[in-house]
Image (cartoon, rainbow, N blue to C red):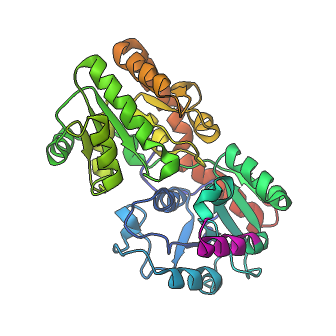
Amino acid sequence: MMSQNPKKGPHSDGMKIAMDVSGLAELRTGTEEYIEGLVWGLNRQGVSVVGMGRHGPLLPDQPGLGLPARPDPSLWRKWWWETVGVKRVPPAVELLHIPHLSHPASRLPVPSVVTVHDLIPWRLPSYRHRWRERAYFSQIKRTLPYATALVAISEATRGDIADFFPGLASKVTVIPNGVHLDFFLPVDVALMEAAHRRNGLRRHPRLLYVGGYDARKNVPTLIEAARRVFDRVKDGELVLVGAAGRAEVLRAAASAGIGDRAILTPFLSRREVVALYHAADVFVFPSRYEGFGLPPAQALAAGVPVVAGNTPAVAEVLRESAILVDAESGEAWVEAILRVLETPALAQKMAARGKIRAQDFSWEKVAEQYVTLYRRLAGGGREG
């Protein structure tokens, strides 16, 4: 199990870096989870992180790094920060890490690392149909070569970089995403029961989905599959985290005839999300495209059996610890979910394998890989 106390990593040497934390808003996206988790892991490796783009010190053991919640910045402010503001690197840092896909149109006074979570706008052109989106992503294509190094969070994302940015392939290091310590720890029973009451959970089998609701997430396929599962087992509920107020999800559930069995929660704190993972019988993830697949990795850490769409990045993360199905095949979804529900020994084996696999994504282990990369960039190849 991971420790909760800072330590001096084998290659950190008291290293000090800067990180763009402007993307921390209200802990609602994978990128925000990534920033918080990476700062936490680096702290455990003895690396000091100076936050850029938000006021106040970073507190690695506090939700949101101790920064007050704020709404997302306007498009203008976001553009200004990514092109001008982030260039103002604080003194006495050895490196700047930009944890999302952007970079100013110039070299910076210290080495710079950019994390590439995915290349959705290039792999899925429907995500850049407006002129504003096309202009923004064209700018990224021009400015990304100024980065000293790129981190791809999966081999699948490295492949996307090679396809769409072949000239940058030599700059890429693959370092997986991490799962926060909270998902590995036993859940407090009182907290889980309180989460049940607040969100109206009352039926089994309980299917859980955590993620987005844009088209590539393929949630309507999941809703229809859930209906067929519930018809077969004569009970059940589907918990859709963060879907409250989404009219299209409500319509899909009503159309499938499971309006009373689909629980659409608001955005929840991490502690509540962890409680819902532990309360689930099966975690389901029907996405058509991912750069990594953080929610199913979190489910592994919590010991929940996972059924997921067989996309390259998700398959890479889950390996043999989950059941992978054709994301578009409703029949495959129904049969896979029923197989887990009706075979307790299989569910137990999947949960055990998942917890072992999830150890590869502890933020302490992941942060060690970042420290090695940082030291190589900042120290002329010195890695210990």
Decide whether residue 15 is among the magenta residues. no
Quadrant (top left/top right/bottom left/bottom right) for the N terminus: top left
Q: Please report the bounds of the magenta region as a residue range.
A: 129-141
Which quadrant holds residue 298? top left
Q: Which of 333 and 170 is in front in this view?
A: 333
The chief SS type of the magenta part is: helix
Q: Nearer the viewer, residue 376 or 239?
A: 239
State whether residue 168 is above or below residue 301.
below
Indicate the position of residue 331 as horizontal and vertical percent values. Answer: 47, 23
Residue placed at 51% from the left, 62% from the top? 35
Farthest-out residue, front: 255
State whether residue 355 is above or below residue 292.
above
Residue 265 left/right relative to 96:
left
Indicate the position of residue 124 as horizontal and vertical percent values. Answer: 63, 53
Residue placed at 37% from the left, 67% from the top? 26
Residue placed at 35% from the left, 52% from the top? 248
